[in-house]
Amino acid sequence: MADFPYFLKFNSFAGQVWYQQLMRKDRIARYLREFTPARLFEDNEQGAWYDPSDITTLFQDAAGTTPVTATGQPAGRVLDKSGRSNHATQPTAAQRPIYRRGDSRGVVNLLRWSEDFSNVFWNKVRSSIAVADAVAPDGSFTAQKLIEDTTASATHYVQRPIAYIVAETYTITCFMKQAGRIFSYLSPNSVSATSGRVTFNLSNGTFVAEQGASGSIVTAGNGWYQCTATFTAVADSSRVDIGPSALSSGQPVYSGDGVSGVYIWGAQLQQGTATPYQRNESTLGGVATGQDTDLRWLEFDGVDDFLETALPFSQAPHMVMMGVRSNATITDLVGTGNTASGNGLLMLYEGRVRSHVWGSELSTVDSSNSLTPSASVVAAQIRTADSIVSRLNGVSTSAPLLGTSATSADSLSIGTRSGSEAPGAYLNGRMYSLVIRAALTSEAAILATEIYIAAKSGVTL
């Protein structure tokens, strides 16, 4: 592949070095913005690129007849995006990793069933919910109408009991749209003896903040507004209330007509100030749909899950780079191995990344830094008659390549090692991305790949 071109030297004026550096930084920045691992294979290099964030490359069966369409489904076939057709498969159903989708922040939304207020998680107080009654802000037909009943001089809302931490700041957000009622409100019910409330005008996008809770409102298109109430909890046992109001301010007590209300969608309660909305349901565990924090991965069970591809590791040099989160300190991530020592093996060993090659002699090197229990970008590189390298989150550690270090021609396993010997330690964790390139790879290309994989893995380098 072509790396960064040389820059013209301007020797006829002062400041030439500064100008060259400025040009180079701009070129590098544009290169990295445009880069995908496909550029590693532009000159027909052998290798593979597996990208679970592209759900169109995932199939539930090894034959590739049943596509993966939702989180929680097995991945029996993962297509290679390098153009070399080195697809990874697992013919045994019980040994297939699971496709997952989640948020790099973890679960920040404390309100489950955040898009389904008909669920028993939400209490309906003098109100009812019409399911799938309107187009939601994300374009799906999942918005629901909160309909007031006919009770006179009363509030009409949905609510969820919450155990707050006293003196902590919280933020409630909910997307709302008028449906017979112009005004709506959010109440944390934990800011003063009189509960606290922010009332919103859904016709002109304004709000009235009252009783200790501060509010904001921003348009979300098609008549929708994202309404926000931020407050400091003064009671540990309280609730979240969401409802319509017939009043522009004060207590939302009125006589309902049994028909009017507001459309609601995407409720969120979180500690601290507002961050991008995260869908939270029991089957998802927190997904920030359409946001930079939205991640996809394959989850390996640490017992027997693995994938295999026909790509051999017999061609050196080669580079392996992976976005991974491991729940174990000793794990074989990627490799071949027809001896107990293993050939062409990238593994986590006692919390460090180990590159492990067995030829006429054993060559091995551990990363200088230890892994934390979070996502990481790990890499190994074997340079012909030169060195073996381990990288962890951009930090490189190298050692001499010893003896005749040709790697095994066995098929490559992902999530353990392959070969005539028993498999190694299975991966208990997540694979966000995997790139394998059977060619000497420059530092510039390695850096670009690491940055790309880091974005797919929720890692900050």
Image (tube, grey):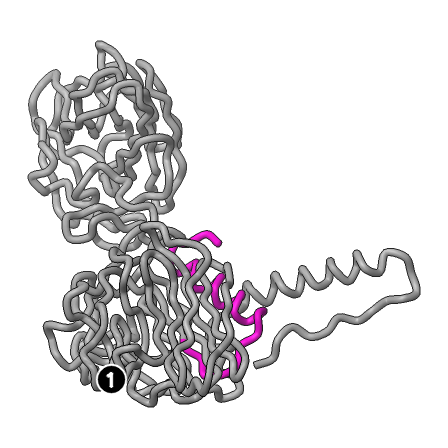
Residue visible at 50% across and 70% down in the picture: 399
Is 173 in the magenta?
Answer: no
Q: Is residue 448 left or right of residue 407?
A: right
Q: Amino acid at mark 1?
A: Gly
Q: Position of residue 403 (x, y in %)?
A: 46, 84
Magenta part of the protein: which range? Answer: 436-461
Is 444 in the magenta?
Answer: yes
User: Along the line of sight, which residue is nearer the eye, 375 or 59?
Assistant: 375
Q: Position of residue 254 (x, y in %)?
A: 16, 19
Q: Position of residue 416 (x, y in %)?
A: 25, 72
Q: Secondary structure at mark 1?
A: loop
Q: Position of residue 259 (x, y in %)?
A: 13, 34
Is 252 placed above or below 413 here?
above
Residue visible at 42% across and 87% down in the picture: 406
Residue assigned mark 1: 419
Residue 67 seen in the current view: no
